[in-house]
Image (spheres, rainbow, N blue to C red):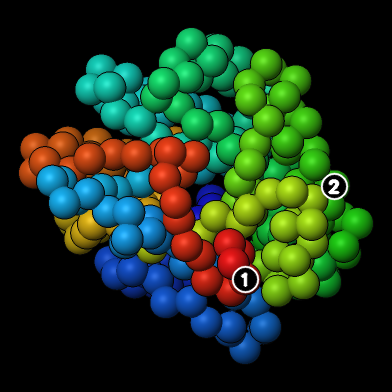
Amino acid sequence: MSFPTVLPRAGLALAVLLSCAPVAAMAGQDGLVEPRLNLRIAEASKDAPRVALTFDACMGKTDERILSTLVDNRIPATIFVTARWLRRNAPTAALFAAHPDLFEIEDHGAEHVPAVDRPVKVYGIAAAGSAAAVASEVTGGASAIAAVGLQPPRWFRGATAKYSPSAIAEIRGLGLTVAGYSINGDGGALLGAAAAERAFSKARDGDVIIAHLNQPGREAGAGVVRGILDLKARGYRFVRLEDTGARGTDGTTE
């Protein structure tokens, strides 16, 4: 869920609220949906609860606090990257390529615009605005991933994680699956460290957690690190989306 750097007060309050509870999939008054994604319960391990860590890399830099925690503890994760972030973070892309056992790299779009095929704003960000623009955002991100030598993506998560239903159908027609989530781990990287840690602590077997890898200057990252290590200490098993089945709402996977 990629909130803009500066949110209106109401948007920030919503981000904080959503960070503390699993999101419920529903269409808002604007007709947009924010899909939920969970690992399939039927495939859940009886020995240890499983969670999928997913991180958005929207623009800017790399949060080395989070990245080093994942590498040092051999914790797998799914990373959604934009083309604009890849252009500024070549060393991190090379690290991803060097650890294919840990990192699954997926599509977050070309320029970080919401995948909505009509002219609206989502959290203050202008949406793609047309079917052609949605397609350009999706394929531009996928092309950038391939251009740095990483495996072609199979999942797509758009900026703000909100979509028009018709855009979801279009993205699926392009051969990608839209990735929602069930736990907002950092409120768009706007939460304090303690709040982010609490959000991670609410994860249960089958949850898909979203957080951000591109905000090294914010407090949220410290809480994300503590949250990850706490789940590890409690015996949780971490999986990538490509390693397990997942079920999404709003026509994203079925």
Question: What secondary structure is marked by label 2?
Answer: helix
Q: Residue at 29% x, 48% y: name it.
A: 51
The answer to whether the residue labelled 2 contacts the one labelled 1, judged by CB atoms less than 8 Å apart, is no
Residue at (79%, 57%) from the top-left corner?
173
Residue 251: image tag = 1
User: Of 45 and 132, which appears nearest the observer?
Assistant: 45
Tell whether 254 sits left or right of 116.
left
Identify the residue shown where x is 42% and y is 66%. 15
**Does residue 52 show up?**
yes
Query: Residue 23's quadrant in the figure?
Result: bottom left
The amino acid beneath tag 2 is Ser
In the rendered view, would you say 51 is above or below 121?
above
- 98 with respect to 119 (left or right): left
Residue at point 61%, 46% (across, down):
155
Q: Amino acid at mark 1?
A: Gly
**Front position among marks 2 and 1:** 1
Q: In the visual, does 28 lie left or right of 204?
A: right
Bin the neighbour count of mark 2 within 10 Å (Cα to Cα): few under 14, some 14-19, many 20 and up: some
Residue sitting farthest toward the left: 234
Residue 130 x, y percent position in the rendering: 88, 64
Q: Quadrant of residue 71?
A: top left
Using the rendered image of the protein, determine whether residue 84 is visible from the camera's viewpoint.
no
Secondary structure found at label 1: loop
Quadrant of res 41: bottom left
Instruction: Tell me the tag on residue 131.
Output: none
Q: Is residue 161 above or below residue 69?
A: below
Using the image as rendered, state which of residue 43 and residue 68 is in the foreground.
Answer: 43
Cα distance in 3D space between marks 2 and 1: 21 Å
The residue most toward the bottom is: 29
Q: Quadrant of the C terminus?
A: bottom right
Residue under label 2: 136
User: Is 44 positioned to the left or the right of 213 in the image?
Assistant: left
